[in-house]
């Protein structure tokens, strides 16, 4: 699956420039599902980028694990979910030194949460490199109940926590790594536009 | 309030070349507080010439009872520091600008690494007080040629985070080691000669540090050069700039008022448009981009000079 091109939007909407090698510096790499292919392409550009890399992969049903494992990262680890590898990821950030690079590839939910963790750990934004691949499903925060609904693919959608019907905004919280969902029928209760699939 | 007349209440040598000057309000009023890294500009009426030099404040940023600066005597310089060392006495009144900070700590940092070369230690003295209150991890590396030159030694607290590198004693600063193992969230601040700032930037680049966390302040006074003339477009006046005078000082001496803050090519305040240029502008500032410099359509009169047939300013 190639890199996703998103249509232009408000400044709040994150953009993902694509991965380019920063050389053989210490690096943390985190990818989910189709994001693996972005890392495979990255290693294709410059194999040395893997020499000092700690690579964490969340397959989410994708078949790319063996190819990723063969890239020669210093450390390779697979995890079933972001939550399952969060402690390992935090530990890697805690042990990292300035000059380390972070490569994130895959869905917006993963990139957003991993970026928020890295910034909180003190990694400068300029050391974070991102590429979107795969599903355009979004991680949404309900602005009313604050609950987060993962893998939202339609607009509007039903909040998994409070049951309101929420409009999918491009307004993004960098702190939470989530887009904001706002009640779509607050003024006209019960009048809800038909759900459409979210487009890039 | 842009400036205030303050009394010199103490002058104390810190090293053979560097003295500390203390200023207080003549009626004992409290002075505006500042933040670590701030500077003031001292007006020095030296005969016909009114000089203005910027100095970092080295007193406690939260102490409004006085301002202190450390002045290094430069006998080959333009005379500002010599004026301070030879003409200023306790009891004198001097005009000081209010503090301005172009080199403040980034308060988002999880750790501060301060790197000083020579007299570049001065902004860090006040920053250390601020860091102590913030209780954020830090380290300071202070490089000087000899112990005699290291005037800052008298001003620094005796704590293990402070590392002194005296090159005469064979203890040189190893930038690769300093930048090689810093935790995430570290910001670096360098003050000193241009060579040191370039070396930190180059080491940082090699180790993958983003530029945004490498801060620096060059200690720059206007460099002397060949005399030149400028024409003021709006009035048609021609003004001569002497070898040891900056263009800004020449304009001020002719009663042409220009906005300024740092007088060292860093803040951008004095930026002036060039309406005609037949020759070469010697850009000494750290403000204009390389493209702007090459276009010769702007000049920073506080530090930059000119060589050639004609320079006309939008003034
Ligand atoms: S006064 Fe600051 S750049 Fe000239």
Image (spheres, grey):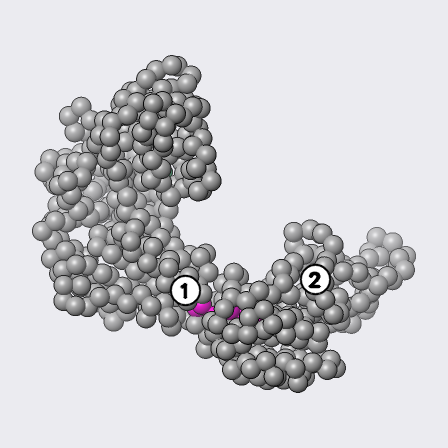
**The N terminus of chain B lies in quadrant:** top left
The image's mark for residue A17 is none
Q: Per the image, is A28 magenta?
A: no
Q: Chain of mark 1?
A: B
For the residue labelled by badge 2, is the local secondary structure a helix, a strand or a loop?
strand
Q: Is residue A47 left or right of residue B6?
A: right
| Vertical placement of residue A68 versus A183, above or below | below
Q: Residues within 10 Å of mark 1 (few under 14, many from 20)?
A: few
Quarter occupied by residue A163: bottom right
Expressed as whole percent of the image width and height from the top left, the position of residue A101 reads 51, 69
Expressed as whole percent of the image width and height from the top left, the position of residue A160 reads 78, 72
| Mark 2 Cβ inside 8 Å of ligand 1 | no
- Name the residue tied to disc 2: A179
- Name the residue tied to disc 1: B206
- Seen at 30% across and 60% down, the residue is B115
**The C terminus of chain B lies in quadrant:** top left
- Seen at 53% across and 73% down, the residue is A49
**Magenta range:** A98-103
* Residue placed most toward the observer, A155 or B4: A155
Expressed as whole percent of the image width and height from the top left, the position of residue B142 reads 24, 61
Q: Is residue A71 left or right of residue A8?
A: left
| Vertical placement of residue B20 versus A86, above or below | above
Q: Residues within 10 Å of mark 2 (few under 14, many from 20)?
A: many
- Seen at 28% across and 47% down, the residue is B219
Q: Chain of mark 2?
A: A
Whether labels 1 and 2 share one chain: no
| Vertical placement of residue A162 versus A188, above or below | below
Quarter occupied by residue A168: bottom right
For the residue labelled by badge 1, is the local secondary structure a helix, a strand or a loop?
helix
């Amino acid at each position: 699956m190639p890199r996703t091109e998103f249509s232009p939007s408000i400044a709040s909407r994150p953009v993902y420039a694509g991965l380019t090698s920063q050389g053989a510096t210490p690096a943390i790499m985190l990818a989910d599902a189709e994001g693996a292919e972005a890392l495979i392409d990255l290693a294709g550009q410059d194999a040395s980028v893997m020499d000092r890399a700690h690579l964490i992969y969340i397959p989410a049903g994708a078949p790319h694990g063996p190819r990723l494992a063969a890239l020669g990262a210093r450390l390779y680890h697979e995890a079933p979910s972001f939550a399952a590898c969060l402690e390992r990821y935090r530990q890697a950030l805690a042990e990292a030194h300035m000059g380390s690079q972070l490569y994130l590839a895959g869905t917006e939910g993963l990139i957003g949460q991993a970026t928020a963790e890295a910034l909180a750990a003190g990694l400068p934004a300029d050391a974070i490199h991102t590429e979107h691949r795969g599903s355009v499903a979004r991680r949404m925060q309900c602005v009313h109940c604050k609950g987060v609904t993962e893998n939202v693919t339609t607009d509007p959608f039903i909040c998994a926590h409070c049951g309101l019907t929420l409009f999918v905004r491009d307004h993004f919280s960098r702190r939470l790594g989530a887009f904001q969902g706002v009640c779509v029928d607050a003024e006209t209760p019960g009048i809800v536009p038909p759900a459409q699939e979210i487009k890039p | 309030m842009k400036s205030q007349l303050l009394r010199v209440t103490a002058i104390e040598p810190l090293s053979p070349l560097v003295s500390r000057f203390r200023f207080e309000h003549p009626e004992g009023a409290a002075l505006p507080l500042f933040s670590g890294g701030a500077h003031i500009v001292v007006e020095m009426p030296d005969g016909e010439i009114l000089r203005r030099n910027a100095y970092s404040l080295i007193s406690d940023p939260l102490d409004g009872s006085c301002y202190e600066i450390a002045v290094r005597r430069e006998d080959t310089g333009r005379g500002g520091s010599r004026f301070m060392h030879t003409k200023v006495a306790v009891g004198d009144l001097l005009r000081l600008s209010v503090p301005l900070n172009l080199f403040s700590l980034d308060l988002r940092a999880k750790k501060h690494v301060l790197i000083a070369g020579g007299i570049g230690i001065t902004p860090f003295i006040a920053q250390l007080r601020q860091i102590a209150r913030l209780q954020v991890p830090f380290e300071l590396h202070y490089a000087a040629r000899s112990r005699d030159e290291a005037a800052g030694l008298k001003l620094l607290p005796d704590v293990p985070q402070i590392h002194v590198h005296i090159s005469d004693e064979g203890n040189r600063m190893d930038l690769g080691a300093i930048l090689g193992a810093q935790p995430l969230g570290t910001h670096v601040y360098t003050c000193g000669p241009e060579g040191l700032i370039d070396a930190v930037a180059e080491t940082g680049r090699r180790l993958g540090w983003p530029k945004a966390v490498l801060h620096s302040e060059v200690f720059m006074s206007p460099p002397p050069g060949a005399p030149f003339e400028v024409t003021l477009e709006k009035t048609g006046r021609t003004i001569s700039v002497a070898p040891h005078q900056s263009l800004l000082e020449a304009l001020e001496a002719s009663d042409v008022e220009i906005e300024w803050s740092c007088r060292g090519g860093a803040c951008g305040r004095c930026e002036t448009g060039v309406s005609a240029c037949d020759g070469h502008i010697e850009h000494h500032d750290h403000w204009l981009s390389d493209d702007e410099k090459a276009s010769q359509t702007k000049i920073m009169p506080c530090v930059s000079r000119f060589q050639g047939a004609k320079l006309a300013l939008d003034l």
